[in-house]
Amino acid sequence: MKKKSKYNVAVIGVGAVGIEMLRVLRQRNFPIGQLRVFARSKREIEVDQSRYHVEAISPAGFEGIDIALFAGTE
């Protein structure tokens, strides 16, 4: 992958591991252009006073994503 100044990132799963991934991305100041969070169903979550819109996972949701971090179950 060519080095970019910012990356479009998807986090799949919002259980304990997915939430920790969101924390680490924020704590490490990872260069995120767009962050998309996916789970089985659409909802809003809060992690450490930051709100995230969770989208229902679909193949179309990965359009333009550079890095996908999977923390979900099958």
Image: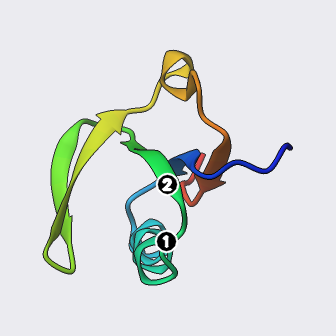
Residue at image point 18% right, 43% down: 43
The residue labelled by disc 1 is 25
| Residue with the most extreme front position | 5
How many numbered discs, if any?
2
Identify residue type, mark 1: Leu
Callout 2: SS: strand
Would you identify the image quadrant in which residue 45 lies?
bottom left
Residue 63 got which mark?
none
Q: Which one is nearer the viewer's eye here, 45 or 31?
A: 31
Question: Does residue 71 appear left or right of residue 19 in this picture?
Answer: right
Say if 46 sits above or below 69 in the image. Answer: below
1 or 2: tag closer to the N-terminus? 1
The residue labelled by disc 2 is 32
Q: Which one is nearer the viewer's eye here, 9 or 6?
A: 6
Cβ atoms at labels 1 and 2 below 8 Å apart: yes
Residue at image point 79% right, 50% down: 3
Percent across and percent down for residue 69 are: 62, 55
Percent across and percent down for residue 1 are: 86, 44
Residue 49 visible here: yes
